[in-house]
Image (tube, helix red, strand yellow):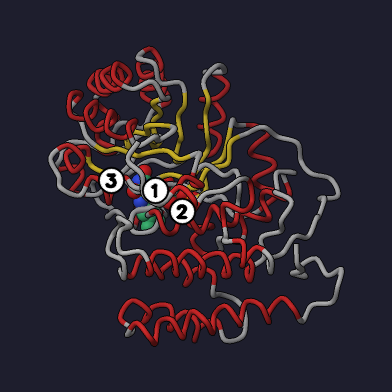
């Protein structure tokens, strides 16, 4: 299997996150949630263009051991004809379970792209049938493919013929004049017949006439009851709700009605929220992922990437390497300054950058050591 990072990077259980030296200083607080909400439902982080690249996903995995991660949308043509296949598909072994999201409308090309994705070891191939952007529309895919379920079914069958992992679909409730329950039911029935049994449903319509892609993320209003109805009608299919999920009790409640939840922007704003979700659902690993612990793990990751010229990626000093830290630096005194430093890091001279990483490491260590023993966020030696 093509591989991104040297194998020794990954280790058993928690230690896959950090080197031994960091581990020895990391949090190992055993917290048992008082009454975890039992649910076997899937929790996934939505594909987010410009965000869910491999570095951000690595950070998310530092926070949550079990959440399902998605790549950004990758056009099938970029994998089949492009020269960037390796940098688009590489990921760290700790990212499993991980889904590859493809966009396209040509069965053969999608099958080729999925085959390549399978060689890279992705756990799921997801088709983007929800994107409303004009560029994607011009390519004839994204949400407008909802109006061609037979074509999409051909794509699903072609992918399944070359790739054994599940083929799933991320869609909307419909778009423009295709707004009826009947339309959505037909869509799901045709695709399930072709072998897709998992649907991530962004619980809003798309309006291609009149709203731009950004507006289409807020309007028209979410409509969970239509997804409820869909689940009741297709009891045997996995229906995963996406859109507007923001708090823990909402996650618990939705998991009682659907087979899973998919969360996007809430995670961008606060990646550590995933640790709270895991804890609420009784899925937390034995380590509590504090901000400081995650920063230590990520600094360790950055040092390895910067040290090793052989690692493939989106450019060793690309802004995407430092972007995930910006999401962690929020809502505490000095956070804005640290965000600005993270944003400048990709341009910094090597010695300045290494000095910054040292300071960051000290900050993370100090930030946890002032807490009293027994404090839920106390970081102690393992
Ligand atoms: C910045 C950004 C990028 C997105 N990129 C993708 C993408 O690549 N593929 C996709 O299927 N949806 C994409 N979406 C839509 C999200 O996956 C998700 O469906 C939407 O944000 C609703 O979920 P949320 O309310 O939890 O954020 C994107 C959304 C945002 C805000």
| Mark 1 and mark 2 residues within 8 Å of each other at the beta carbon | yes
Mark closest to the chain's N terminus, 3 or 1 = 1
Residue 381 is situated, as x and y percent measured from the top left of the image, at 75, 67
Real-space CA distance between mark 3 and mark 1, rounded to the nearest whole angstrom: 27 Å
Quarter residue 111 falls in: top left
Q: Which residue is mark 1?
A: 91
Q: Image height check: is 340 above or below 77? A: below
Q: Residue at x 70, y 49 (%)?
A: 285
Quarter residue 67 falls in: top right
Number of marks drawn: 3
Name the residue nearer the viewer: 238 or 202.
238
Question: Disc 3 or disc 2, which is closer to the eye?
Answer: 2
How would you rate the neighbour count of disc 3 (Cα within 10 Å): few for under 14, some for 14-19, many for 20 or more?
Answer: many
Residue 199 is situated, as x and y percent measured from the top left of the image, at 45, 29
Say if residue 221 shows up in the picture: no
How would you rate the neighbour count of disc 2 (Cα within 10 Å): few for under 14, some for 14-19, many for 20 or more?
Answer: many
- Disc ID at residue 100: none
Quarter of the figure that contains the C terminus: bottom right
User: Which secondary structure lies at badge 3?
Assistant: loop
- Disc ID at residue 57: 2
Residue 295 is situated, as x and y percent measured from the top left of the image, at 56, 69
Quarter residue 331 falls in: bottom right
Real-space CA distance between mark 1 and mark 2, rounded to the nearest whole angstrom: 9 Å
| Mark 3 and mark 2 residues within 8 Å of each other at the beta carbon | no
Q: Left or right: 224 with respect to 344?
A: right
- Disc ID at residue 132: 3
Q: Image height check: is 381 above or below 167? A: below
Name the residue nearer the viewer: 381 or 220.
381
Name the residue nearer the viewer: 280 or 233.
280
Question: Disc 3 or disc 1, which is closer to the eye?
Answer: 1
């Amino acid at each position: 299997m093509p591989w991104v990072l040297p194998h020794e990077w990954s280790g058993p259980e928690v230690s896959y996150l950090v080197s031994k030296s960091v581990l020895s200083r990391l949090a190992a607080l055993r917290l048992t949630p008082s009454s975890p909400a039992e649910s076997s439902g899937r929790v996934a982080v939505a594909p987010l263009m410009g965000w869910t690249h491999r570095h951000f996903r690595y950070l998310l995995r530092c926070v949550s051991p079990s959440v399902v991660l998605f790549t950004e949308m990758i056009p099938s043509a970029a994998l089949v004809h492009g020269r960037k296949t390796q940098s688009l598909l590489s990921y760290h072994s700790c990212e499993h379970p991980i889904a590859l999201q493809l966009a396209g409308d040509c069965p053969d090309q999608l099958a080729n792209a999925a085959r390549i994705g399978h060689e890279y070891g992705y756990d799921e191939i997801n088709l983007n049938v929800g994107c409303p952007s004009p560029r994607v529309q011009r390519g004839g895919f994204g949400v407008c493919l909802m109006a061609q379920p037979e074509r999409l079914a051909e794509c699903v069958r072609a992918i399944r013929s070359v790739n054994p992992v599940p083929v799933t679909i991320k869609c909307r409730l419909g778009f423009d004049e295709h707004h009826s329950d009947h339309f959505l039911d037909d869509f799901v029935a045709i695709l399930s017949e072709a072998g897709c049994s998992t649907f991530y449903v962004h619980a809003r319509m798309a309006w291609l006439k009149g709203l731009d892609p950004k507006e289409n993320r807020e309007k028209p209003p979410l409509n969970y009851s239509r997804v409820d109805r869909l689940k009741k009608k297709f009891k045997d299919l996995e229906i995963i709700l996406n859109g507007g999920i923001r708090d823990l009790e909402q996650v618990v409640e939705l998991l009682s009605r659907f087979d899973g939840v998919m969360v996007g922007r809430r995670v961008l704003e606060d990646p550590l929220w995933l640790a709270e979700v895991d804890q609420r659902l009784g899925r937390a690993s034995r380590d509590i992922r504090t901000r400081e612990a995650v920063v230590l793990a990520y600094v360790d990751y950055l040092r390895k990437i910067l040290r090793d010229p052989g690692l493939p990626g989106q450019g060793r000093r690309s802004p995407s390497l430092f972007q995930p830290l910006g999401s962690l630096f929020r809502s505490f005194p000095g956070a804005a300054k640290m965000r600005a430093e993270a944003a400048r890091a990709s341009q910094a001279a090597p010695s300045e950058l290494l000095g910054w990483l040292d300071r960051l490491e000290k900050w993370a260590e100090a930030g946890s050591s002032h807490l009293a023993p027994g404090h839920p966020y106390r970081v102690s030696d393992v």
